[in-house]
Image: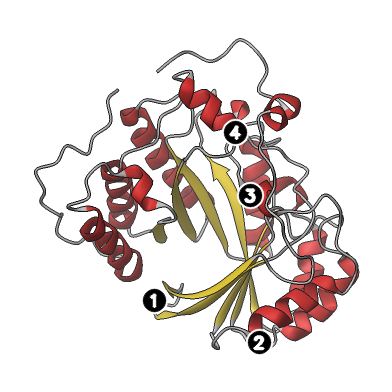
Amino acid sequence: MAEFPQFRLDDRWISSLRGEKNKVDPEKPYACLVEKERTASGEIEDVTTVFLTNRECPFHCLMCDLWKNTLDYRVAPGMIPHQITWALNHLPPAKHIKLYNSGNFFDGKAIPEQDHAEIAQMLAGFETVTVECHPKLINEKCLNFKDDLKPDLHMAIGLETVHPDILPKLNKGMDLNDFERSIRFLNRNNIPSRAFVLLRPPFMTESEGIKWAKRSIDYAFYLGVECCVVIPTRAGNGALDWLQTNEYFSHPAISSLESVLEYGIQLNTGRVFADLWDIELFSSCKRCIHKRKSRLQQMNLQQKILPSIECDCDLSKSE
């Protein structure tokens, strides 16, 4: 793996490598679905996820591709509740809901603060509500929204990696002190949190990717995070494609994801999930990918290490 580039990986450079955004409708979420998830209570239950359409996140993280489904302006007041209503009318009922907005729920330039009370009222029938937010935007606004909610509020936060040199390179606008402050704030106010952990971000070899993903899980649980989601880093946002072409980045192998998930589950400290979006990107073997995906799905649900899939393929990535 090549050394760090000598130029700054900043907002301007990252944005210059982007392609076109997808066309999205401010009156509808750009996606919504219901899927099974093992909840904090240990039950396997239906969870609704609504991917809200709104303004692009002000943070330009090196690895992020969520900007593809965002607008260049803030939606009008009332539009986010309208999107949620649309989603709930098109989905079967569920006990839990996640509201993901490709950015930060408590960014007033993304989701109008005056909509919070109406959103809370709409969600009264759920048991839990999970929203996502940057650590620097976790503050008293979270508590105000929590007070309006009948369901329990959960927070999803991007930790990414605890690697001291690579985290600053991700242009995330945060450090570990920011993450720790946000988790301790949430813990004091009885708001459970889940952390997103990257598997093999740029500038890591395969073995380093595994090592630092495990360390990141350890750190998150040490602070009191309730759940970790391991996300294999993938190209497709422009910046990572450039880094991949110039040998600063390679996709992790599915075997590495298996290893990190197994590690997290055996800790028996909190829930650990493997993100399976585009999982086929991380395997070179068509003979076993479906079995491996199914195994990861079941491990996500059962939180148990299941027997390995035997295949004569070589799924490892070169160092």
What mark, if any, has residue 89 been given in the picture? 2
> Is the N terminus in the top left, top right, bottom left or bottom right quadrant?
top left
Mark 1 vs 3: CB contact within 8 A: no
Q: Is residue 151 visible in the rendered structure shown here? A: yes
Q: Earlier in the sequence, mark 4 or mark 1?
A: 1
Mark 1 lies on a secondary structure that is: loop
Q: Earlier in the sequence, mark 4 or mark 2?
A: 2
The residue located at (42%, 26%) in the rendering is: 204
Q: Which residue is under mark 3?
A: 66
Q: CA distance from mark 2 to mark 3?
A: 24 Å
Query: Looking at the image, is mark 1 or mark 3 nearer the viewer?
Result: 3
Q: Mark 1 Cα within 10 Å, few/some/many (few <14, many 20+)?
A: few
The residue located at (39%, 76%) in the rendering is: 42
> Is the C terminus in the top left, top right, bottom left or bottom right quadrant?
top left
Q: Hey, which quadrant is residue 30 in on the image?
A: bottom right
Q: Which residue is under mark 4?
A: 238
What x and y, as percent, mark residue 38? 41, 73
Q: CA distance from mark 4 to mark 2?
A: 35 Å
Q: Nearer the viewer, residue 145 or 37?
A: 37
> Horizontal placement of 181 versus 272: left or right?
right
The residue located at (79%, 65%) in the rendering is: 26
Q: Nearer the viewer, residue 134 or 33?
A: 33
The amino acid type of the residue labelled 3 equals Leu
What mark, if any, has residue 42 been given in the picture? 1
Mark 1 vs 2: CB contact within 8 A: no
The amino acid type of the residue labelled 1 equals Gly
Mark 2 vs 3: CB contact within 8 A: no
